[in-house]
Amino acid sequence: MIRARLGWLGDRWVEDVFVAWDEGGRVTEVRPGRSDDGPAEDGLVLPGLVNAHVHLEQTGRKAPAETGLAGWIGALLRGPAAPLDAVELGIAQVVASGTAVVGDVGNGGDAWTAIAAAGLGGVAWHEGLGRGRGTVDAAVAAVAPADDRVNGGLCRRPTPHSLYSTAFPLASALARPGQAPAALHFLEDPAERRFLSGGDGPLAELLDALGVDWRPRMEGLGEPLDVLRGLGLLGSHVVLVHGVELLPEEWREVSESGASVVLCPRSNLAIGGRLPDVPSALAAGARLALGTDGTVSSPDLDLWGDVALLLGRWPHVDPAVWMTAATLGGAYALRLDATYGALRVGARPGVLWAEGVRAPADIGRVPARSWRVAPRGIA
Ligand SMILES: [Zn+2]
């Protein structure tokens, strides 16, 4: 149990809060602090963070120096592979930074075993990739089944990677309405809009240079949201990742569709030098989550670095927006909000302590953190 000077419950701040939990990390009590609880500790108690977009299997891989998405991907593919223990390296980083839940995206399909062994919750998305050969059925069968529950906190799910790397029919087949959400990289870079609207530009040139036979499976080119809608991929069954290039009216359309959007601002700055249109996202009432992305584009896997960046860049935005995105908003995007992302009775979100955070504005500095209930302690 803990009595803290400040608490973040997942969607709101409270001053002087008392939180108790049982042996399995299930929260049993959340209420105002009382004198018989002993003195309030000087800092912030909060649920474990939700890193809603990360590529654990890329941890430790050399980051390309090129900028612009197409050049960056090309350099990544030419560079050395990730170390064999990449997933374990990544898990150590996310746990050390106070993350209890990951939205991990991988091609190998086996990261979930290490994620489960670490006690982390979340989703291990297995990407379907490819533009050319083979049938859609065979490609779907090669990735994880829809919403396969590994344990009480972790699911395996299939997902398309993006609309420039995954054949359109396969992308549609991997994210069906009514299924648990897939995670689609979308409008991360201006080149993607050009690819989707005209079938040309740097991403088309990259695919050609890689010898990918991509043109036959691109029925329905047009404005990006029209393409997305035409493929049945605009809705609450798809989490859109990045959205850097979303225009104000597109933010409105995405919000109305029920889709969450995961922002990965430090990754976006590294690859494209640009950030999403946050004022338009907020004006549209977007359901936001946050992710670090992998260490090939992000300096580390500490989600608080992204919180601090966003608060620094938009100082007039209520810090609660970014705290929600880093906790309950992320859990909602993964559809795991009944368990994670909030300090509420019955949930088992992990309990995190942030040193020296005395007021909401203090989250703009990355604080030292320690676990009161670590992921391994959540039963
Ligand atoms: Zn990514």
Image (tube, helix red, strand yellow):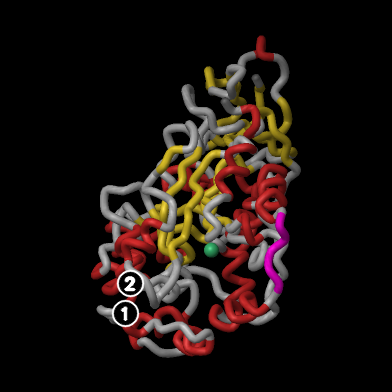
Going by the numbered disc 1, the residue's amino acid type is Met
x 65%, y 64%: residue: 298
Residue at the outermost top position: 36
Quarter residue 332 falls in: top left
State which quarter of the image contains the C terminus.
top right
Q: Crowdedness of circle 1 by 10 Å Cα count: few (<14), some, many (20+)?
A: some
Q: What number is the disc on residue 168?
A: 2
Q: Nearer the viewer, residue 73 or 372?
A: 73
The residue carrying mark 1 is 218
Going by the numbered disc 2, the residue's amino acid type is Phe
x 48%, y 22%: residue: 345
Q: Nearer the viewer, residue 110 or 53?
A: 110
Give the magenta range.
Answer: 80-84
**Where residue 116 appears, x then y in whole percent?**
58, 39
Q: Nearer the viewer, residue 159 or 294?
A: 159
Q: How many marks?
A: 2
State whether residue 286 appears in this view: no
Q: Crowdedness of circle 2 by 10 Å Cα count: few (<14), some, many (20+)?
A: many
Q: Is residue 272 magenta?
A: no
Q: Nearer the viewer, residue 114 or 363?
A: 114
Q: Do the numbered discs 1 and 2 sit on residues whose CB atoms are within 8 Å?
A: yes
Quarter residue 32 falls in: top right
**Where residue 79 appears, x then y in whole percent?**
69, 76
Q: Is residue 340 left or right of residue 15?
A: left
x 44%, y 73%: residue: 165
Chief secondary structure of the magenta span? loop
